């Protein structure tokens, strides 16, 4: 009978990356995503061109790299997910882990819709004539302008109240956009099929944990760079490309006096580096203890920011081409977010020779860029829940079943966002629930918990034990002072700069929708301080003892000195055997 009980509670091993390459590609695939292609270039041109790189670099140095190293190293040290990692390091801050998972859930629901739209566009890209290239379709209106024809410049420049064929394809064919969020309408069945396909793909990418994820990233993390290089070369050879690149990088120092420029630089860093939500903690937790996380972090941060800059050349060379062909200023064609991916760029490829080829390249890149960010986020949630409930989920077949039910639930939740009014719901979640302010708030708590309560000196000692390299003293300064201060100022600034949500610069959301949005934002923000408060006010012991206990790391954590000694002995033994 005792043997049966032991067999019942036996849990499977967490597993580890099969090689260093798997880890690097998984992190690269996670942090290098759609934001590098459709957000950074737009922010750069909008906020002073080359001058925008100054606030961007300030946030990279004071927040991006320090938090990237902090999260990766504590994950590698504890070998735990995004929730149990905090439980072991600083129980008072465990709410940070739960809050991060809430934000990831919102993000997974929104992000996969972009992939579904891109898959639909990819299917249309194989048509003999691209459907967004002409105004002769059933969904087009009398105000449609076909700018891909030879006299398109004349027509576009001499008409008002007109819309392009690409805009009408997006709003009327793909979205079938209703008049507002109250008009839900019917489900877009083609989009639903694409959404279902993307959920199936994501499921099989991670259903076996790091064993499957580590293999998939060889394709999803590398192939987008091939596509980006092809699109970059093509963009640079187009007429008008140089003017687009000049517009992208031409410094405008006066913009640095605008606080909004600094706020947007900070938000871009926190988003593109995947900070605050536990992704880096989970990915680092599958490393071996003696992996050189210090070197990895510096190289991955450089790769992330470098990709953003290079993507700007690919995007703005095409925008310069569009400006040249249409005879309009670049600011009239520049867009960010879905507007760039599903209106501006498709419109641009329709004006090129062999438009189907370039459309296929572009949407394959979009799908692969977003796919690894999506399935890594799912893996982070799965790992965090599995580590919190190991006896329940780390048993044969349990993970696969739970992941299936989890993906199926999110698929049904997403159905509301693929209705005729779904785009309004998508924007609501993206603007509030996945807001940069939520992540900034968590990063303030994170840096305070590890920089002060756990201890920056202790953290440096752990990194030195694991990586064999003592971190630069500047990181201690950041973890204790600069990172929490800059994050807090940015958080307050984002609240001060808040504006109610609008859609297409014209539709104003009702007041109740903005209230609902704030409730969605608070659903993650209040978790971290709320958890700490509940832990402090509950419990049988006196308050002083509870505080002391909640601020102490678990004794089961590895001893850095012992681990370092074991590593040295192992290296000596290996050298002895080799000789």
Image (cartoon, rainbow, N blue to C red):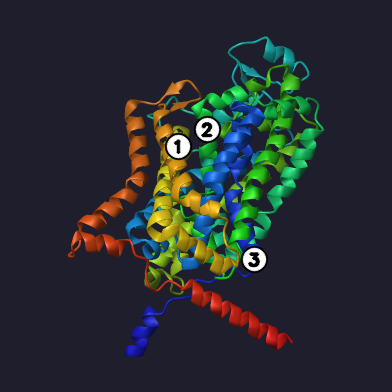
Q: Residues within 10 Å of mark 3 (few under 14, many from 20)?
A: some
Q: Position of residue 419 (x, y in %)?
A: 46, 36
Q: Which labelled disc corresponds to residue 334?
A: none
- Measured in 3D between alpha carbons, the distance from the residue under mark 1 to the one under mark 2, in whole angstroms, is 8 Å
The residue that mark 2 highlights is: 262
Q: Residues within 10 Å of mark 1 (few under 14, many from 20)?
A: many
Q: Which labelled disc corresponds to residue 20?
A: 3
Are dots 1 and 2 in contact, CB under 8 Å? Answer: yes
| Camera sees residue 340 | no
Point 73% across, 12% down: residue = 154
What residue occupies the far top of the structure in this picture?
Answer: 158
From the viewer's perspective, is 360 left or right of 534? right
Q: Along the polypeptide, which appears first: circle 1 or circle 2?
A: 2
Q: Position of residue 89 (x, y in %)?
A: 40, 63
| Camera sees residue 270 | yes
Quarter of the figure with the N terminus: bottom left
The residue lying toward the viewer, choosing from 363 and 188, is: 363
The residue that mark 1 highlights is: 490
The residue lying toward the viewer, choosing from 150 and 192, is: 150
Q: Secondary structure at mark 1?
A: helix
User: Is residue 487 shown above or below 317?
Assistant: below
Residue 343 image-quadrant placement:
top right
Point 67% across, 44% down: residue = 307
Q: Along the polypeptide, which appears first: circle 3 or circle 2?
A: 3
Point 29% across, 50% down: residue = 530
Q: Secondary structure at mark 2?
A: helix
Point 59% across, 27% down: residue = 47
User: Is residue 306 shown above or below 543?
Assistant: above
- Measured in 3D between alpha carbons, the distance from the residue under mark 1 to the one under mark 3, in whole angstroms, is 35 Å
- Measured in 3D between alpha carbons, the distance from the residue under mark 3 to the one under mark 2, in whole angstroms, is 35 Å
Q: Residues within 10 Å of mark 2 (few under 14, many from 20)?
A: many
């Amino acid at each position: 009978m005792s043997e049966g009980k032991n067999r019942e509670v036996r849990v499977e091993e967490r597993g580890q990356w099969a090689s260093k390459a798997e880890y690097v590609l998984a992190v690269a695939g996670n942090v290098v995503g759609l934001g590098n292609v459709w957000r950074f270039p737009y922010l750069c041109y909008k906020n002073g061109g080359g001058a925008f790189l100054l606030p961007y670099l300030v946030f990279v140095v004071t927040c991006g790299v320090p938090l990237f190293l902090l999260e990766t190293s504590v994950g590698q040290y504890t070998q735990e997910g995004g929730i149990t990692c905090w439980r072991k390091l600083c129980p008072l801050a465990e709410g940070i882990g739960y809050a991060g998972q809430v934000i990831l859930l919102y993000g997974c629901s929104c992000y996969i819709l972009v992939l579904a739209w891109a898959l639909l566009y990819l299917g249309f890209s194989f048509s003999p004539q691209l459907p967004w290239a002409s105004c002769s379709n059933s969904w087009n209106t009398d105000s449609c302008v076909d700018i891909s024809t030879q006299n398109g410049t004349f027509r576009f420049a001499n008409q008002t109240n007109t819309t392009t064929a690409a805009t009408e394809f997006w709003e009327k064919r793909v979205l079938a956009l209703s008049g507002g969020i109250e008009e839900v309408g019917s489900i877009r069945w083609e989009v639903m099929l694409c959404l279902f396909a993307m959920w199936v793909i994501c499921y099989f990418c991670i259903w076996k944990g790091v064993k499957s994820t580590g293999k998939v990233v060889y394709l999803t993390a590398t192939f987008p760079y091939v596509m980006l290089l092809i699109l970059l070369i093509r963009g640079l050879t187009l007429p008008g490309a140089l003017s687009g690149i000049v517009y992208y990088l031409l410094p405008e120092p006066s913009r640095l006096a605008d606080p909004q420029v600094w706020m947007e630089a900070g938000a871009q860093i926190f988003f593109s580096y995947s900070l605050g939500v536990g992704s880096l903690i989970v990915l680092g937790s599958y490393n071996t203890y003696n992996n050189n996380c210090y070197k990895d972090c510096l190289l991955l941060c450089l790769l992330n920011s470098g990709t953003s800059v290079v993507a700007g050349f690919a995007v703005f060379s095409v925008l310069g081409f569009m400006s040249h062909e249409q005879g309009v200023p670049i600011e009239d064609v520049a867009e960010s977010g879905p507007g760039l991916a599903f209106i501006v760029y498709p419109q641009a490829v329709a004006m090129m020779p062999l438009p189907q080829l370039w459309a296929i390249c572009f949407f394959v890149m979009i799908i692969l860029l977003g796919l690894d960010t999506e399935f890594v986020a799912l893996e982070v949630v799965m790992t965090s829940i599995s580590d919190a409930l190991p006896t329940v989920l780390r048993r044969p077949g349990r993970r696969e079943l739970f992941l299936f039910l989890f993906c199926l639930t999110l698929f049904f939740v997403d159905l509301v966002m693929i209705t005729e009014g779904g785009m309004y719901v998508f924007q609501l979640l993206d603007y509030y629930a996945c807001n940069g302010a939520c992540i900034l708030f968590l990063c303030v708590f994170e840096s305070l918990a590890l920089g002060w309560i756990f201890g920056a000196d202790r953290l440096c000692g752990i990194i030195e034990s694991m990586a064999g390299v003592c971190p630069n003293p500047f990181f201690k300064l950041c973890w204790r002072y600069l990172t929490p201060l800059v994050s807090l100022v940015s958080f307050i600034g984002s609240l001060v700069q808040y504006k109610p949500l609008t859609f297409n610069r014209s539709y104003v959301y009702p007041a109740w929708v903005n209230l609902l949005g704030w409730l969605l934002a608070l659903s993650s923000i209040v978790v971290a301080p709320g958890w700490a408060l509940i832990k402090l006010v509950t419990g049988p012991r006196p308050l002083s003892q509870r505080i002391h206990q909640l601020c102490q790391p678990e004794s089961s954590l590895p001893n850095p000195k012992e681990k370092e000694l074991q590593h040295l002995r192992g290296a000596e033994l290996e050298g002895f055997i080799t000789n």
